[in-house]
């Protein structure tokens, strides 16, 4: 055998031996690839779980924010309703004062025919009362009005405007949600049987009791309004509140 044949045979043997060696790492690569795929799958599952947790937290947060917004809307609606009611009463009060001034040059008392008119010939007393009302209506100075009405009651304890002054103090405290003080003022109004503010004062006492969780007492006030003032706006509101 010549040298070329020997060289060729040796090369063939070397290639045949090297081929299995070169092929051997293939299973290792598959195992390695399989392990990486499992790890990748685990990471994907973890990422999905984390995403679900994040989405749940976001949903919970959105639900809480929606609940807060709903509560704010309800409070704002209630506050707007109270403002509208107070403004309506204030305008009626001013109209009553103007009517009383033009209709009665001397002190008069409320009558069944004209229960809203209360007027005194004391111009200083009239001016003090009207100034307190104007602090609410024109100046929107509710704190100043509270002080003015308290001062008025102290200076004119027997005034024909006493019930009205207590009523407006009750309204001012009620709008600030100071229900304890509002209750005292409305209770004072309820003692004046002939006051045109008595029906609404009793209604407010019922609403205060209702807000304080005293349903039985609230319904007693509401029923009293309905029985005593059956055709009044306050009676309609009392029926709706029960």
Image: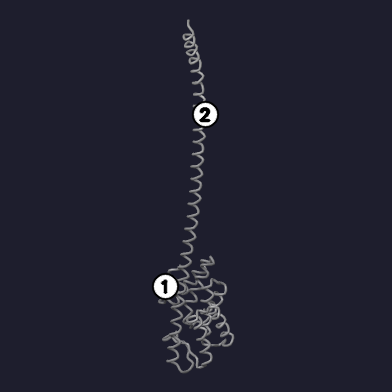
Q: Which residue is at 58% across, 84% downward?
A: 151
Q: CA distance from mark 2 to mark 1?
A: 82 Å
The count of marks equals: 2
Residue 32's disc number: 2
Q: Compared to 84, does 157 lie above or below? A: below
Which percent across, then down, holds residue 182?
54, 75
Which percent across, then down, holds residue 3?
49, 8
Q: Which residue is at 46% across, 82% downward?
A: 196
Report the residue that reaches farthest toward the top.
1
Q: Compared to 205, does 22 lie above or below? A: above
Residue 236's disc number: 1
Camera-nearest residue between 26 and 95: 26
Q: Nearer the viewer, mark 2 or mark 1?
A: 2
**Mark 1: few, some, or many residues within 10 Å (few <14, many ≥20)?**
some
Which percent across, then down, holds residue 241?
45, 68
Report the residue that reaches farthest toward the left.
231
Q: Secondary structure at mark 1?
A: helix
Which percent across, then down, holds residue 29?
50, 27
Circle nearer the N terminus (2, 1): 2
Q: Are marks 2 and 1 in contact (CB under 8 Å)?
A: no
Q: Quadrant of the C terminus?
A: bottom left
Report the residue that reaches farthest toward the right.
154
Q: Which residue is at 49% across, 58% downward?
A: 65
Q: Secondary structure at mark 2?
A: helix
Q: Compared to 46, does 237 lie above or below? A: below
Report the residue that reaches farthest toward the bottom.
105
């Amino acid at each position: 055998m010549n040298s070329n044949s020997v060289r060729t045979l040796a090369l063939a043997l070397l290639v045949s031996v090297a081929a299995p060696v070169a092929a051997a790492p293939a299973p290792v690569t598959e195992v390695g690839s399989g392990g990486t795929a499992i790890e990748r799958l685990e990471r994907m599952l973890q990422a999905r779980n984390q995403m679900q947790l994040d989405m749940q937290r976001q949903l919970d947060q959105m639900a809480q924010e929606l609940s807060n917004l709903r509560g704010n809307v309800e409070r704002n609606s209630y506050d707007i309703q109270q403002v509208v009611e107070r403004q309506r009463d204030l305008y009626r009060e001013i109209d009553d004062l103007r009517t009383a001034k033009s209709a009665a040059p001397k002190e008069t008392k409320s009558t069944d025919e004209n229960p809203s008119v209360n007027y005194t010939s004391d111009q200083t007393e009239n001016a003090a009362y009207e100034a307190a009302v104007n602090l609410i209506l024109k100046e929107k100075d509710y704190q100043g009005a509270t002080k003015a009405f308290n001062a008025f009651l102290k200076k004119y304890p027997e005034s024909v405007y006493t019930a009205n002054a207590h009523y407006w103090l009750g309204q001012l405290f009620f709008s600030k949600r100071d229900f304890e003080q509002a209750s005292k003022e409305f209770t004072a109004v309820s003692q004046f049987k002939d006051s045109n503010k008595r029906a609404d004062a009793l209604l407010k006492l019922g609403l205060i009791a209702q807000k304080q969780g005293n349903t039985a007492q609230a319904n007693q006030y509401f029923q009293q309004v309905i029985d005593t003032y059956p055709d009044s706006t306050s009676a309609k509101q009392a029926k709706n509140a029960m």
